[in-house]
Image (spheres, rainbow, N blue to C red):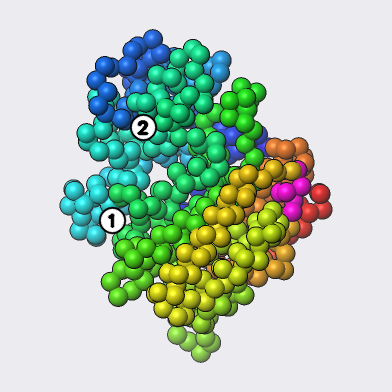
Amino acid sequence: MVSRVRSAFGGMIRAASRHAGRVLPALGIATGTVAAISLGLTASEPLQAQSSYSFTGVASCAGSTCHGRSEGNGAIVRQDEIATWQSPSAVSGAHSRAYNVLHGRRGRQIVASLGYNAQQEAENCYGCHATFAPVSQRGPKFQLDDGVGCESCHGAAIGWLESHYEVQGNHRNNVANGMTALEDPSTRARVCLDCHYGSTDRGQFVTHSMMAAGHPRITFELDLFSAFQQHHDVDDDYIQRKGRPDSVQLWAVGQAEAVARATDLFARPGYGTEGVFPQLYFYDCHSCHRPITDGEERRLTFETNPGRPITFGQPPFNDENIIMLSAVADTLAPGRAEAFRNASRAFHASMNQGRAEAQQAAIALREQALGLSGALSSRGFGNNDAFTVVERIGSQATAPRFTDYAGSVQAVMAIDTLLNAMVNDGRVTVGAAAGIRADINRAYDAVTTPERYRPAAFRAALGEAVGAIGRLR
């Protein structure tokens, strides 16, 4: 199915096309540090004897007999993965462009506003805008300006590169030699969250100060983001090596890991506070950052949310993933649902009490989220799961919680990705899905930008889409 997936990131709409569960191949290769892919290490070339370094660089993957072909016609893997990663304009090329973003107009404005020197920029930005390996761990082909290269996600390659291309090699050996097992949903989520939410590693945490200087809002949805970056075909060979991926499982585990990551960082003293204020990065920016006007008629900039027992006007913790995970727990892990729901409400309530209480509540909520992640990772998934979750998202128990921009963006991304899962599983036809697309696009229109966010219009459009999907069950 071809669907237009639109989501708001820092006030911009980004589009991606998906076909049969994978991102359409990128057209063309950008000029840059890996443009001369014929210079890459090929399968016939031995690794250098010097192995004191761990990171080999993108060029070590870019040979024409490895992943540097111009067409995806390899016998086992596509072998055009570099072209997809290096696309100059498609979403699939965003990782390769990440370093250059820092040196564009907006990037330089942010750095200037924050007053960073070169060292401070590296320490605070390169952890997510590049493969920020220590200098001592960089091999001769490694180049920092490659951006977010292969090893950012797949792991430092010196240990597994040789077993990766040997004739009798297999994925199990690669993982044993240090390759990251991205086929595991929890592992993939944690790798992605390092940059798409934050971590304690160097340069992998976006502060409120960075956002004030112009950094875009951070959001995360594992299945959708995986589709954006997908550079492989899920064929018989892939399934034999890594198992069949399940979109509903990826989405659900991603929500659980996102809640666990957010609460883990929030509970840490060095991250949860900034001077006399809480670290406002964790809060729902747009619940406060709406137009402030003074006139005869008041204009409310805060809607009471039934899932957040906080004082009216209290800045709410960004609960976009908490809302989704509540729907997941209710439908896919009902035995854990009540405990998670109680922990999430207690966490929100703690915001009225104090930092110590909020810290303890965050730790408790994190434990519940990690428990859900483990249960979802080991659970078998059936054809009705996507329908059940969609129904729950649109139910009277969940939909009233879509009062804020961030949660609404997360909800429409969820309905979109779950509908795609139904099509890919053969539960919904392409034609039927196309008929629902108008309702989903109306929901996207309601969250095009924070300034134009319309909660009532969003809930109505989402409800129409959910109802139409339910009638196909």
Does the segment drawn in magenta span residue 118?
no
Q: Residue furthest bottom?
A: 296
Q: Residue at x 36, y 42 (%)?
A: 98
The amino acid type found where label 2 is placed reads Ala
Residue 3 vs 290, above or below: the answer is above
Label 2, secondary structure: give it: loop
| Residue under pointer 2 | 156
If you read the primary sequence from the N terminus, does the residue marked by circle 1 or circle 2 appear first?
Answer: 1
| Residue under pointer 1 | 110
Q: Is any part of residue 392 visible from this angle?
A: yes
In three-dimensional space, the C-alpha distance between marks 1 and 2, rounded to whole angstroms, equals 30 Å
Image spot of residue 402 (x, y percent): 61, 67
Image spot of residue 258 (x, y percent): 50, 54
Residue 396 vs 199, above or below: the answer is below
Does the segment drawn in magenta span residue 385?
yes
Q: Quadrant of the N terminus?
A: top right
Q: Is any part of residue 442 visible from this angle?
A: no
Q: Residue at x 51, y 82 (%)?
A: 311
Using a 10 Å C-alpha cutoff, classify the residue at mark 1 as few (fewer than 14 neighbours), some (14 to 19) or many (20 or more): some
Image spot of residue 182 (x, y percent): 51, 36
Q: Magenta span covers which residues?
A: 383-388
Which quadrant would residue 139 be assigned to in this image?
Answer: top left
